[in-house]
Structure formats: C-alpha cells, structure tokens
Amino acid sequence: MRQRTAASLLALSAICRAASSDAIHFREPEIPLWTNGAPGSQGVTAKEEWLPSTDGIHRIKSVHNPTITVFLPPKEKATGAAYIICPGGGHSHLTMDLEGADVAKTLNEMGIAGLVLKSRLAKTDGFHYKVDVESLQDAQRAIRLVRSRAKEWNIDAARLGIMGFSAGGEIAALASTRFDSGKPEASEPMERLSSRPDFAVLAYPGIHPGELTPTQGTPPTFMVVADDDKLSMASAEYYMELKKAGVPVELHIYVRAGHGFGTRGRTEAFHQLPAYTWPARLQDWMIDRGFVAKP
C-alpha cells in the first residue's frame, strides 16, 4: 500500500510539473490595456487558459483582459525605437514565446523595445469577439498606451511600429490601415493620442488583401514569408496593393521556411536556412529607412 501511495504521489508530481510547464511567467512587467476592463469585456470572469505544450512552445487562449508585456533593451543599447508585437495562433490562441517573447528578445538585441500584445481572440468559445473589432481595438489601445508611457520606457513616441505573425499579422495589417490621429473629444488623455503605427512588419501574415485598404498614410512596411507557405501568394498580392497606394514596402520571400518560424525558428534545422537571417534584413531596413541609427 505504501509503495502504491508513493507511486501515486510521484505520478501526481509529474503531472503537476507537466502542467506548470504549459504556462510561462515572464519577469518583465505585464500592463493591462484598460484598468477597468476592455470595452465589451467588462465583468467577464472566464480565466485565461494555457494549452498543453507538446513541442516546447507555449500558447494561451481565452483572453478577456488584454495586456502588453514590456521587454526593454539595456539603456546603453536602446535606440528609442519600439514594436508592438502581435503573436499568431489562428485567432484561437496566442503563441506567447516563439512569436512573442522570443521576438521581443531578438529586437532587444538590436536595441529595440518589444511590447508583446496579449489580445482578445475572435475564436474564443462562447464569445463573439471579432478580429476587426476587439482584436484591432486592443492593438490600437496598445499603441496609445505605449505612446502615453514612452518617456518612462525610453521610447521615442514617433518611432513606434507594429509587428505581427500569421494571424497576428492580420491584426498588424489592420492597425496599419485603420487608424486615427487621436480622439480629441475623449475624456481619457490616452485616447487623444494617435493609433497610427510609424512602421509595420508583417511576418507570413494571414491576410485577405481585398479586405485591406492601404493608403498613402499606411506606414512603411516590411514583409517576410516563405515560398513553401500557402500564405505567400496573399503576401505578394498585398505587396502590390501597398505599391499601388504609394506605400514604401520591402518584401522578402524565402524558398524554404514553412510557416510559423518566428525570429528564431522551431528547430535547429531552421538555423541552416537563409530565412534564419531575416531579422538581420529587418535591421538593415530599419537603418535604411532611418528608424534606427547604424550600430
């Protein structure tokens, strides 16, 4: 009996350890976008849920209280530039490390701040969130929030971009085509700030070009995708739409990389591919456009 009890305890302990590894807890500060709840989600008591991790990647769903997690580069390395990072996950979950924290750390190495957005998801069971309503609203609010605290975080409010991966790329594209210069009638000072990003990065974005309307006001855009990704054609089509609208745009299509590679890839094999160098191409673009100075 004692042996069975001991075995049961060991099994329970293993289960608990496995469950705890499904969630990640950042040391960096996590800031709610709204102190009294997001519009349309006030009073929601449903809890966030981390999905079981079978591949070392961490995913969260059922988000009702959107936040940003603030990853800042060392002060001596900071360029003043920053990105709101929108992780992917098919609008059903968010990949918080591969397309979130890992991306922020890559940017930090360049001296760029990375602010990982945890937004509401259109495919949340029992709710009726929409990509172009709640998810977009969260991205716009994140931009305003960072601008309101730019001085505190050593960020230049005029060099704040948005970066999205896969489904997050759709949110980033929406934010770069649907923005305002601020709401002067708003009672909250933050809402009077512009929601326009100063530049945009779309990584293998899950976009539908006909549903996006870029204009001359759409910020300069950098795009990256792999030819062996089924989303590559849509990226190429959106590139042409940006060109027609007079938006400065740079598109990189790599032969091999698949989908969902983030900035560091899912496996060591990715490190042998030319696509592994795409963050360096992004840095070149940032320097060429004058968003950051050459190191």
Image: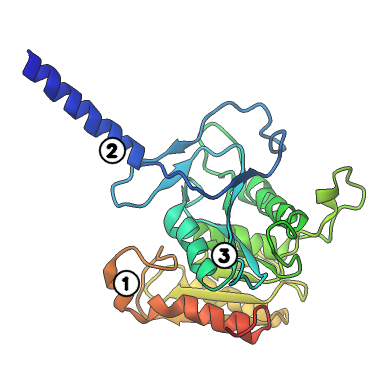
* Local crowd size for mark 3, using a 10 Å CA cut-off: few (<14), some (14–19), many (≥20): many
Tell me which amino acid carries mark 3. Answer: Pro
**Cα separation between marks 3 and 2:** 31 Å
> Quadrant location of the N terminus?
top left
Against 93, residue 210 (above or below) is: below
- Residue at the farthest right position: 185
Question: Mark 3 or mark 2, which has the lower sequence index?
Answer: 2
Residue drawn at the location 69% of the way across and 63% of the way down = 154
Tell me which amino acid carries mark 1. Answer: Phe
Q: Secondary structure at mark 1?
A: helix
Against 258, residue 280 (above or below) is: below
Q: Is residue 99 visible?
A: yes
- Residue at the farthest top position: 1
Say the numbered circle drawn on residue 270. 1
Nearer the observer, 264 or 93: 264
- Mark 1 vs mark 3: give the one in front: 3
**Cα separation between marks 1 and 3:** 25 Å
Tell whether 217 sits left or right of 286: right
Question: Mark 2 or mark 1, which has the lower sequence index?
Answer: 2
Q: Which residue is mark 3?
A: 73
Against 250, residue 13 (above or below) is: above
Tell me which amino acid carries mark 2. Answer: Ala
**Cα separation between marks 2 and 1:** 27 Å
Tell whether 122 sits left or right of 272: right
Tell whether 224 sits left or right of 216: left
Q: Which residue is mark 2?
A: 18
* Local crowd size for mark 2, using a 10 Å CA cut-off: few (<14), some (14–19), many (≥20): some
Question: Mark 1 or mark 3, which has the lower sequence index?
Answer: 3
Q: Is residue 206 visible?
A: no
